[in-house]
Amino acid sequence: MVNDRVDKDATVCVSVFDSLAELLHKRLEAGVVHPKVMIETNINPKFIGGRLHLNATSGNHFILTMRWPQTIIYLRST
């Protein structure tokens, strides 16, 4: 799991596995990395405004909501 700061106000969380994780680790190790703490829970995402995915396989899920200032900043910059 990698948290990558896109700009000063937005952070992206990325899940990677196997050889890609090792490659990403080496590249991040070469630069400046700020440690982050992530807490995982079994809370239903609907309770906190997220989406509940019926597909249990791994995949990329991007949730953009206008309730988060980081989303508004990101969308204005693109």
Image: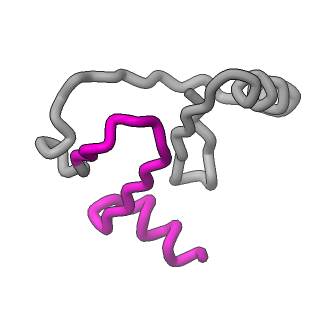
**Image location of residue 35, percent across then percent down:** 60, 23
In the picture, measured across the screen, residue 34 lies left or right of residue 12, that is right
State the predominant SS element of the stretch in magenta: loop
**Image location of residue 13, percent across then percent down:** 52, 39
Against 78, residue 56 (above or below) is above
Residue 62, quarter of picture: bottom left
The quarter in which the N terminus is drawn is top right
Against 34, residue 9 (above or below) is below
Which colour style is shown? one colour
Against 78, residue 70 (above or below) is above
**Residue sitting at x 83%, y 24%:** 26
Residue closest to the eye, 38 or 63: 63
Instruction: Write down the region rendered in magenta.
Output: 52-78
**Residue sitting at x 81%, y 28%:** 23
Residue closest to the eye, 52 or 27: 52
**Residue sitting at x 32%, y 63%:** 65
In the picture, measured across the screen, residue 15 lies left or right of residue 44, that is right
**Image location of residue 6, percent across then percent down:** 62, 52
Say if the magenta span includes residue 73.
Answer: yes
Task: Pick out the residue farthest to the right.
Answer: 30
**Residue sitting at x 25%, y 44%:** 54
**Image location of residue 45, percent across then percent down:** 21, 40
